[in-house]
Image (spheres, rainbow, N blue to C red):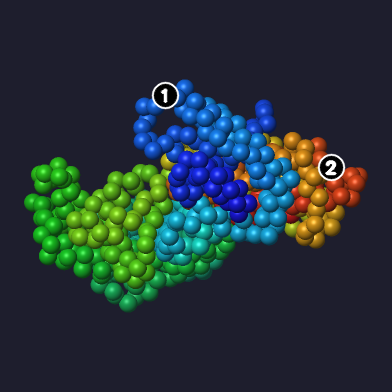
Amino acid sequence: MAACSFRRSIASQLSKVLDLPPENLIKSISAVPVSKKRRVADFQLSIASVREDNSSDCLAPDLHLQAQKLAEGLKCDAVVSEISAGPGTVNFTINRELLAKTVLRQVLKDGSEYGVKSELFSTVPKQKAVIEFSSPNIAKKFHIGHLRSTIVGNFIANLKVALGHEVIRMNYLGDWGMQFGLLGVGFQLFGNKEKLKTSPLQHLFEVYVQINKAAEDENTKKLAKDFFRKLEEHDEQTLSLWKQFRDFSIDEYIRIYKRLGVHFDEYSGESFYQEKSKEVLKMLENKGLLQKTIKGTGIVDLSEKKDLSSFSTVMRSDGTSLYITRDLAAAIDRMNKHNCDTMIYVTDKSQSNHFQQLFQILKLMGYDWVERCQHVSFGLVQGMKTRRGEVIFLEDVLNEVRSRMLENMASTKTTKEIEDPMETAEKVGLAALIIQDFQGLLSSDYQFSWDRALQSRGDTGVFLQYTHARLHSLEQMHGNEQLTDINVACLQEPDAISVLQHLLRYDEVLYRSSQDLQPKHIVSYLLTLSHLAAVAHKTLPVKGSAPELAQARLCLFQAARSVLANGMKLLGITPVTQM
């Protein structure tokens, strides 16, 4: 990584003056974000982060003095061409030609691994992670929360895989429980085998809505209870119908996930754990953790003082398991089966309490690995409607974004003859959805807006795709062979330097996202990269420039496009080459 060699060079000089080992300094030296208003240095060292006493009460003027003193004790060399002190920082400017040469060579050499190979990650152990995400309920609507879970989980999985971790992508379906009693009865009354085959999600949802109208009726209730009891007792006919519901639904999910560019290694589900949850209840009983209430339900006391001020219900009065019991069984089973280092659950924040209880019970049961389990929660999306009204199926959202994008593409004069407009509209539309979703903190709610998401200018996924396509066609026009020998003296304009400085920061941005699992750092990095590339595209023409200059600029744009594509793919976006 280009940034690494510069950081190391600065650290080794600092280590002599500060008498600290260079590896302790590397993380305190960070690339400086590009500023529109002024020329900035390339790296800065924060004085506060290397002070021995690390006391927070040291005063700012004191830090400033220290920075000045330190800057005076350092010398410029072949790598660093300028050193200055700022408020509590020492700033380093890299030799301009060396900057261009090192960054471009590294980006083009590493390709899709640029930034990932950085030594920032050298202390991070390679791990095996199970990531559970998406997890819709069969026969209920695949709501927009499932879309968020799908794209967030996919991002976390992509990032971990890129960083060399082993990842198991798991979809934990809501495929068990009392609603299947209702659904079974509903299907016997209103079901249609043909429709179940051709559009299972839609048909099962319609059946579920119809039978729900009669759900209060005593006879229906009794039939539903009977059906579910037969399921629990593994009655062949009942099971075979349930299996069709599940299998046909998974086939359709796979098709829809494919449109999203998402895949799963395992389709698990609550149904896998109805037997195992009985074992969990036995274990809880043996450990003296299971208490019975007057009503006969089973609970686990979670309070500090053991006064039942907080508890979790794990068993119905008839002895059957609940959602949390199945989750306990699933967690224990996954740990045994995969022996993973970390387990991540991606769901909306309304389930925070559920996961708190889940982790508490596992801890009480003596499973120390629960410390390595994590709930990544996200906020709610408001106002996601299609022209036909409320969103019920994910497919509606994908069709809507595609058709709106096709309209926008048709109305712009610049749209050339595209080989597959539907496919392009889908990929650009998906980028729009993902970028709008990932711009803020995951935990915050946001108001969805089609117009804002699909703007072609501004901070949108459409703008990222447009930039990528433009840079790609620039390469196509001017020969897209790998450029090795370029004259970096040609890349000294401020707009070229800004792009290079920004490319320098990529590994730090990846590191931040890998630490807090928030995609927003990468999103804002890519939007800035696109804005900087757009400015450079205007001010540094390739066409009509002298061959040497044209080659150097082309190389700069190639590097920008390469990093843009890498970052987009991490977010779950497929870069388009024309639009």
The residue depicted at 48 percent of the width and 57 percent of the height is 122
Classify mark 2: residues with Cα within 10 Å, few (<14), some (14-19) or many (20+): few
Q: Closest to the observer: 410 or 527?
A: 527
Answer yes or no: is residue 139 visible: no
From this viewpoint, which residue is outermost toward the left?
294
Which quadrant does the N terminus fall into? bottom right
The residue depicted at 20 percent of the width and 50 percent of the height is 312
The residue depicted at 80 percent of the width and 61 percent of the height is 481
In the picture of the structure, the residue carrying the numbered disc 1 is 59
Looking at numbered disc 1 in the image, what kind of residue is underneath it? Answer: Leu
320 relative to 433 in the view: left or right = left
Q: Closest to the observer: 447 or 490?
A: 490
In the picture of the structure, the residue carrying the numbered disc 2 is 541
Find residue 118 and report its image quarter: bottom right
Classify mark 1: residues with Cα within 10 Å, few (<14), some (14-19) or many (20+): few
Q: In this view, does 172 lie above or below 354?
A: below
Question: How far is mark 1 from mark 2, CA to CA?
Answer: 48 Å
Q: Which of marks 1 and 2 is nearer the N terminus?
A: 1
Q: In this view, does 255 lie above or below 349?
A: below
Q: Which of marks 1 and 2 is in front?
A: 1
Looking at numbered disc 2 in the image, what kind of residue is underneath it? Answer: Pro
Question: Residue 391 location, x and y as percent?
Answer: 51, 46
